[in-house]
Image (cartoon, rainbow, N blue to C red):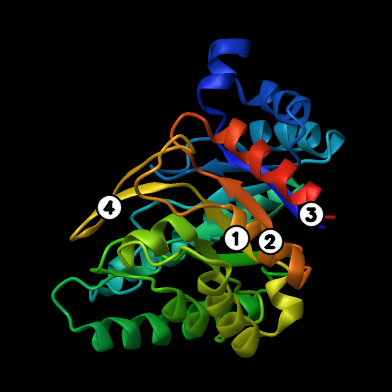
């Protein structure tokens, strides 16, 4: 089934629950009518397995599926072999944290940045390293029941157009895209306006990966301010300038009957905006 949730809890949690406390999050998210949650380790893995296990049980009791965002500094395009080893290590640790949470199955990560290489060189290196990394993970039987989700990015020097992400996902059957539609819209200077604009992206993904895998798609959604160099900052649904609008996406997900996970990344209002999307989608049924 399609699930809606938030990345973090934003302003609402602070207002209702006070100081940050992961063990309070499952009940809070469930009370808002949501059934998914993304925990960000963007600045590093700073949580014990014991806390993850305790929190994971509470998420399971409330039927809230957990996703994890790996550290932002993963970069499979870095030419240094020791930096590649670190990036692979961050994925390994992310997999361990998914297992610790238990009721968790999506690991979102950034593929890499172009740096001084040409784009073709960077993509070639990422492709080679993805093949090596995921072949190793398969041999070690690390991936059963999990989805690793390279993210579509919002700046030109980052590797992560929607086509690049989909093409990278052809490397292994446990790879599925994270379509961050705010990023895609920012990178393409506001191209997402109609259902047809979203349809083009989904049709490419289904053609390359098949409908069954796309049913496990991970989606980030927020409105994002952008400039000539792409993404500037996340906004919330009050914005009437930058977009994109969520309604055409919800309509397409309904038309295609895709059981994606939709995570709101709105600035401060991610819980409220996730619920707005959920209610709109439910009215389409």
Q: Are marks 4 and 3 in contact (CB under 8 Å)?
A: no
Residue placed under numbered mark 4 in the picture: 226
Residue placed under numbered mark 2 in the picture: 251
Specify which label sits upstream in the sequence, 4 or 3: 4
Q: Position of residue 8 (x, y in %)?
A: 55, 34
Q: Nearer the viewer, mark 4 or mark 2?
A: 2
Give the numbered dot on residue 284. Answer: 3
Q: Is residue 166 left or right of residue 223?
A: right
Q: Are marks 1 and 3 in contact (CB under 8 Å)?
A: no
Badge 3 local density, few (<14 within 10 Å), some, or many (20+)? Answer: few
Up-down relation of residue 105 to residue 158 (above or below): above
Q: Are marks 1 and 2 in contact (CB under 8 Å)?
A: yes
Give the numbered dot on residue 248. Answer: 1
Q: Position of residue 165 (x, y in %)?
A: 47, 75
As measured in the structure, the alpha-carbon distance from the residue carrying label 2 to the one carrying label 3 is: 7 Å
The foreground one among 228 and 156 is 228
As measured in the structure, the alpha-carbon distance from the residue carrying label 1 to the one carrying label 2 is: 5 Å
As measured in the structure, the alpha-carbon distance from the residue carrying label 1 to the one carrying label 4 is: 20 Å
Q: Is residue 146 visible?
A: no
Specify which label sits upstream in the sequence, 1 or 3: 1
Q: Are marks 2 and 3 in contact (CB under 8 Å)?
A: yes
Image quadrant containing the N terminus: bottom right
């Amino acid at each position: 089934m399609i699930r809606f949730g938030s990345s973090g809890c934003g302003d609402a949690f602070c207002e209702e629950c006070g100081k940050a406390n992961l063990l309070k999050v499952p009940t809070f998210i469930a009370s808002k009518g949501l059934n998914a949650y993304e925990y960000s380790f963007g600045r590093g893995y700073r949580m014990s397995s014991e806390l993850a296990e305790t929190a994971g049980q509470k998420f399971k009791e409330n039927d809230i599926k957990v996703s994890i965002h790996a550290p932002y500094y993963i970069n499979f395009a870095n030419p240094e072999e020791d930096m590649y080893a670190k990036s692979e290590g961050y994925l390994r640790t992310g997999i361990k944290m998914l297992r610790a949470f238990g009721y968790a199955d999506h690991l979102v990560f950034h593929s890499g940045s172009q740096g001084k290489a040409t784009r073709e060189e960077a993509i070639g290196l990422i492709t080679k390293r993805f093949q090596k990394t995921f072949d190793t993970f398969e041999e070690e039987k690390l991936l059963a029941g999990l989805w690793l989700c390279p993210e579509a990015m919002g700046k030109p020097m980052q590797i992560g157009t929607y086509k690049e992400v989909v093409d990278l996902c052809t490397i292994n059957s446990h790879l599925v895209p994270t379509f961050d539609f705010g990023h895609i819209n920012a990178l393409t200077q506001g191209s997402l306006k109609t259902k047809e604009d979203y349809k083009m992206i989904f049709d490419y993904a289904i053609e390359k990966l098949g409908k069954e895998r796309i049913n496990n798609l991970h989606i980030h959604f927020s409105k994002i301010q952008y400039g000539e160099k792409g993404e500037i900052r996340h906004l919330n649904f009050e914005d009437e300038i930058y977009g994109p609008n969520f309604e055409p996406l919800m309509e397409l997900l309904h038309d295609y009957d895709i059981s994606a996970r939709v995570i709101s990344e709105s600035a401060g209002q991610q819980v409220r905006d996730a619920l707005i999307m959920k209610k709109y989608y439910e009215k389409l049924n």
